[in-house]
Amino acid sequence: MFRLVSHPDEVKIVTRRFGLGAANIDRYLELGGYASARKCLAQGPDWIINEMKASNLRGRGGAGFSAGLKWSFVPRNSTRPKYVLVNGDESEPGTCKDHLIFLHDPHAVIEGTIIAGLAIGAKLGFIYLRGEYRYLLEIMEKAVADAYARGFLGAHIFGSNTEFQIITQTGAGAYEVGEESALMESLEGKRGIPRIKPPFPAVVGLYGGPTVINNAETIATVPHVIEMGAEAYAAVGTPRNGGTRLFSISGHVERPGVYELPMGYNLKKMIYEVAGGIRGGRKLKAVVPGGSSTPVLLPEEIENLGMDFDQVGKAGSMLGSGGVVVIDDRTCIVEFALRTISFYQHESCGWCIPCREGTDWLKKSLTRFHAGYGVARDIDNIQYIAENMMGRTFCPLGDAAAMPTLGFVKKFRKEFEDHLNGKPCPFAKHVELAVI
Amino acid sequence: MSDETMTLFSPRLAARFDALVLKYPLRRSALIPMLLYAQDEIGYLSDAAIAEVAQRIGIPELEVRNVASYYSMLRFKPAGRYNVQVCTNISCMLRGGYDVYERFQEELGIGHKGVTADGLFSLEEVECIGACCWAPAIQVNYDFHEELTPGHVPGILAGYRGRAEAEGTVFHV
């Protein structure tokens, strides 16, 4: 079983039903479930969208775009059917929060999907889970069937004349499908190749219809925003960063786990107090603040760093998916950089040349480098390749591979130099990584 | 399919397919789930399985192969009855994922994408499986095992050997 953790500094909003058996629909109703959807049905789309805008709820998938604003972009009078698409293709290394949401509170995902549907006037929503999450898909399928049986989904939701249907969908293994346009392609039964934007999904999305795509955490947060009221929710966070965030803290900490903390919570405190500090009393070397695609931060950079989209952005990284990966002083950064780029090389869909070739060259260069066969100009070359991938691809995967690589080279140049001229890696046991 | 005797799909899988295609605005949206469900039942995407999915969806086989080759969980060769997938991505790597992977290699005598001679196990090094806070983690088919050390490996394998003996020779995922 996936251990739940707790800390007094947590503000349990999205996680408040975790561990309380809320996957059972009766239990969910006892705990206040589906009241927000009923309220939204009575209030109508304008009210919902205004509440969402006022809540400052920003996309939890990584980009941090205002959910209310995104919903407001959907044209009211579309001749094509509109859709809601919940992105549960959670695959950013270091991130496992949606896993717990599907496990402990599947009805919150359904309720949030209904509310999004009411806001944009959609009659059909999809909840897409990564293929590896089969047991969670089964939990979601059961929850959806229960919601249909109670009349919360179907042709007349909650006894009204409004229709809303939900389809659960499994993926089959592809990080790239977490990108919104690739996700739509996958749902249409195709390879997960990204589409060029514009047009944005809010205008031309799934099956060519206007589509709202939100991360599973964003959607699961929606009923709580309605329940608390937008102002109260926004007040929990920092300016322009409403509410809480589910931080997946992993790596070299004493108490790894998913913690729900207010937006803007200090990163140093998060590592040393909430997660119990560095394992075995070691020293902190670096931290990846928001999933593997976000540039690494040094201990001195996290002293006064509040974890919200704007502050982490100012510090030169990104809040991303909230996956905080903590690295101690016994870790080889070159090996870490190599493992990171190996992932992106494996997951690049191959559609855009800068990403396909760039990730391949970076992996080759770093493999050679880590094995002790690097030459001095390789360091600049790695930086040069990464810089030339940035902003030159259809989707953000190219950037996601280039950004952390640039961070590692810039901030740990000396460690790269220590690997030069056939010197063995001062840290690593695994000099040659298996090629996936 | 009109002629039920020609089908590779079990009645359960066929019923699942029939229910699934009706739900979508476009029939083809059932393709990826159906490939995975067919693989769960048959063990891999054989030529016959691909042909049947293509026919049921109503698209050319080439289209099915083109799509299937994109997704890392879909395979064109049989795996072991229990497919051991060891995550070595960053969060697992930091907490000993490679040590766990090495121990599986030693115990099973196979490497990445290898299958044991008795067909019971296959092994794969995989990318992040979404269990980062409980690292290192693995999946055996769809079952998660988390917070592992190399010392857990023999017990996990013994558990699946016992399950295979109890369940007999019927292929089961």
Image: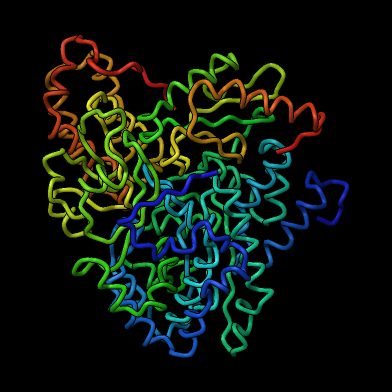
For the residue pair A328 and A394, the one nearer the viewer reads as A328
Residue B34 lies, in percent from the top left, at: 65, 51
The type of colouring in the image is rainbow
Residue at 28% across, 61% down: A262
Residue A189 seen in render: yes
User: Would residue A353 be seen by someone viewing this image from the given angle?
Assistant: no
Left or right position of B39 against A315: right
Residue A252 drawn above or below residue B36: above
Camera-side residue of A11 and B33:
A11
Residue A152 in the image: state x and y as whole percent. Answer: 60, 78
Position above or below: A78 against A292: below
- Is A246 placed left or right of A405 in the picture? right
Position of residue B121 measured from the top left corner of the image (x, y, whole percent): 65, 25
Among all residues in the image, which is located at the extreme front?
Answer: A8
Which residue is pictured at 44% across the width and 63% down the height? A16
Q: Nearer the viewer, residue A20 or A141?
A: A20
The number of discs equals 0
Q: Which quarter of the figure is the N terminus of chain A placed in?
A: top right
Q: Quadrant of the C terminus of chain A?
A: top left
